[in-house]
Amino acid sequence: MFPGPLINATTNDVIHVNVFNNIDEPLLFTWNGIEQRLNSWQDGVSGTNCPIQPGKNWTYEFQAKDQIGTFIYFPSINFLKAGGGFGPIRVNNRPVIKIPFPKPEAEFDLLIGDWYLKSYEEIRSLISNNSTANDSSPDKILMNGKGSYFDNDSRVFESFTVTKGKTYWFRISNVGTAWSVNFRIQSHRMVLVETEGSYVNQMALDSLDVHVGQSYSVLVTADQEEQDYYIVAAPKQINATGTSNLIGVAVLRYGNSVIPPRSALPPGPDPFDIQFSVNQAKSIRWNLTAGAARPNPQGSFNVSNVTLSQSFILQSSVVDINGEFRYAINNVSYVTPETPL
């Protein structure tokens, strides 16, 4: 199954996931965005868990304590994420706490990810050997695992069927390894309502930048003519003009439509316009009056009177370790411990 199955939970649910490792190397899964309060040994990342050995299984147990929102899970070590294994997580409001917008007609999970024609083992080896960026750069963008793989002429698109006049909740996540994307839907605006566990002040957008590991919720109203429309995820910092196989495509399909999408893919912002991304991110604001995991408003906890006793400055850098360049913080690069902390 690709992507993996949906984990559909409600605030404070305890979740059990039994993972069987049927591949030939160690494996860990992480539950991106789940806070793991007093439970870090279930987080599934290097340094907190021992990997699941080949042929073995492990049951993760964690609680979505005081959380709501859109999240993802994925393999966290050895570049296994590039081979798949990722899936969506929904943490829904408890019934006693209303969502801060009218209930949509339906919800859709949309996982956007870059994809390699080489195997993850090959890409891992190239990165370890300091190969050039072109050698280890992704080849495609897929949506929910669909799109062109090897043959650009035999692609299968993901599609979402809607009814004219209804509003739909899209939970969008970037599950890739390298590329940020700009997400847009032909002829439709979207309303941003939630990001990674917090409701935000609603804002209407023509397109949305989604960086690696990020998750957003948007509302889309089917208010156009009944036909098919392109859904696009275009890579940032890459000139994809004339190379549409680098652009992820899905279809928004009106239920009675017999008309394919018209014209070319909808244009988006300049992929090299960094300020567009910065300004959009800075414009997102927490909804301080909405209830979420608890009945009291998200903004009811006031941190303005907290006294700061220490400040920490983290400086990123690149260091040479045994002849290999590695990213570092304060000139210290991460080394996987032999046993979990």
Image (spheres, grey):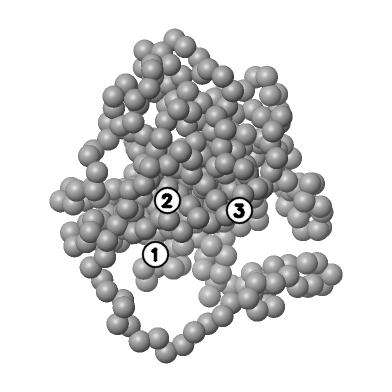
Closer to viewer: mark 1 or mark 2: 2
Whether residue 42 sits left or right of residue 320 in the image: it is left
Whether residue 233 sits left or right of residue 298 in the image: it is right
Mark 1 or mark 3: which comes first in sequence? Answer: 1
Find the distance from the CA under tag 1 to the CA under tag 2: 13 Å
Confirm whether residue 214 shows in the render. yes
The three-letter amino acid code for the residue at tag 3 is Ile
The three-letter amino acid code for the residue at tag 1 is Gln
Q: Give x and y (percent) for residue 202.
A: 33, 48
Q: Give x and y (percent) for residue 87.
A: 47, 43
In the foreground, 102 or 42: 102
Mark 2 or mark 3: which comes first in sequence? Answer: 2
Q: Are marks 2 and 3 in contact (CB under 8 Å)?
A: no
Q: How crowded is the residue under tag 3: few (<14 C-alpha within 10 Å), some, or many (20+)? A: few
Find the distance from the CA under tag 2 to the CA under tag 3: 25 Å
Label at residue 36: 1
Image quadrant in which you'd find residue 190: top left
Q: Are marks 1 and 2 in contact (CB under 8 Å)?
A: no
Whether residue 238 sits left or right of residue 35 in the image: it is right
Find the distance from the CA under tag 1 to the CA under tag 3: 33 Å
Image quadrant in which you'd find residue 236: top right
Q: Residue furthest top?
A: 258
Residue at 80%, 46% in the rendered image: 135
Label at residue 71: 2
Circle 3 sits on which residue?
274
Q: Give x and y (percent) for residue 262.
A: 53, 17
Q: Give x and y (percent) for residue 131.
A: 82, 54
In the foreground, 217 or 187: 187
